[in-house]
Amino acid sequence: MTGRSRLTVLAGPTAVGKGTVAGYVREHHPEVWLSVSVTTRRPRPGEADGVHYHFVDDAEFDRMVDEGELLEWAVVHGLARYGTPRRPVEEALTAGRPALLEIDLQGARQVRDSMPDAFFVFLAPPTWEELVRRLVGRGTEEEPEREARLGTARVELAAAAEFDVVVLNDDVRRAAEELVSLMRSPEPIAKRD
Ligand code: 5GP
């Protein structure tokens, strides 16, 4: 029988490529269980309900919060709510599957409070300029949203020290492989402040 596995939380600044790294893991490492978040934002082109997110309305999100169904949740960029359904995470961990959450910093802090034994990975951009280039280059957001995301990113970059390890996203495949190998690593986690 397999024992309970360890939860890994991947966080980092906006547009650093967390979603892309998580997508690489989804595609190339089926042994890793990836949490599907709920969100109140609208789907972008190419996003499938139940695969990238569970797209819900405000009433359904409220219900999930009220019933304690979310392990963590946050308003991201002041624009939409995002949350991690608790039960699938518990089931994956109980089944002994390496489990990964790709969430924002506020969510990562909530998980640190409720599951301090989880493994916290900060995905960092190679440079601030590269982060800005990625953010602006994506071209999916209007100006006010882009400004909000840049502001969030500045604050989030300073949070790297709160994490167990920093992985540099200089190359998606390399970063994803480093993440997966860290998830496999049996080494005990160094103590955090
Ligand atoms: P996007 O709208 O670009 O898909 O995601 C925006 C931000 O929401 C990203 O930083 C992503 O990590 C974060 N996010 C996605 N799912 C969750 C979640 O379940 N909880 C929290 N706290 N943040 C999430």
Image: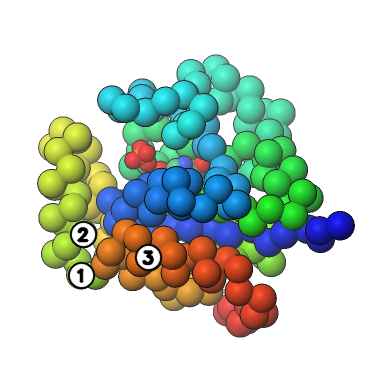
- Return the residue at label 3: 175
Q: Quadrant of residue 176?
A: bottom left
Q: Few, some or many C-alpha atoms within 10 Å of disc 3 (few <14, some 14-19, many ≥20)?
A: many
Left or right: residue 38 compared with residue 150: right
Residue 94 seen: yes
For the point 44% across and 65% down, the residue is: 177
Kind of residue at badge 2: Leu
Determine crowd level at label 1: few under 14, some 14-19, many 20+ residues with C-alpha closer than 10 A. few
| Amino acid beneath label 1 | Thr
Q: Secondary structure at mark 2?
A: helix
- Name the disc covering residue 127, or none: 1
Give the residue at mark 2.
131
| Residue 50 picture location, percent across and down | 51, 27
Residue at 60 percent across and 68 percent down: it is: 184
Task: Please identify the quarter of the rendering in which residue 178 is found.
Answer: bottom left
Q: Which numbered mark, 2 or 3, is in the foreground of this view?
A: 3
Horizontal side of residue 187 vs 76, given as left or right: right
Residue in view at x 13 percent, y 55 percent:
133
Q: Amino acid at mark 3?
A: Ala
Contact check, label 3 and label 1, Cβ < 8 Å: no
Rendered-image quadrant of the C terminus: bottom right
Separation (CA) of disc 2 from disc 1:
6 Å
Alpha-carbon distance for marks 3 and 1? Answer: 15 Å
Of pointers 2 and 3, the one earlier in the residue sequence:
2
- Local packing at callout 2 (Cα closer than 10 Å; few below 14, some 14-19, many 20+) is many
Nearest the eye: 182 or 62:
182
Q: Secondary structure at mark 1?
A: loop
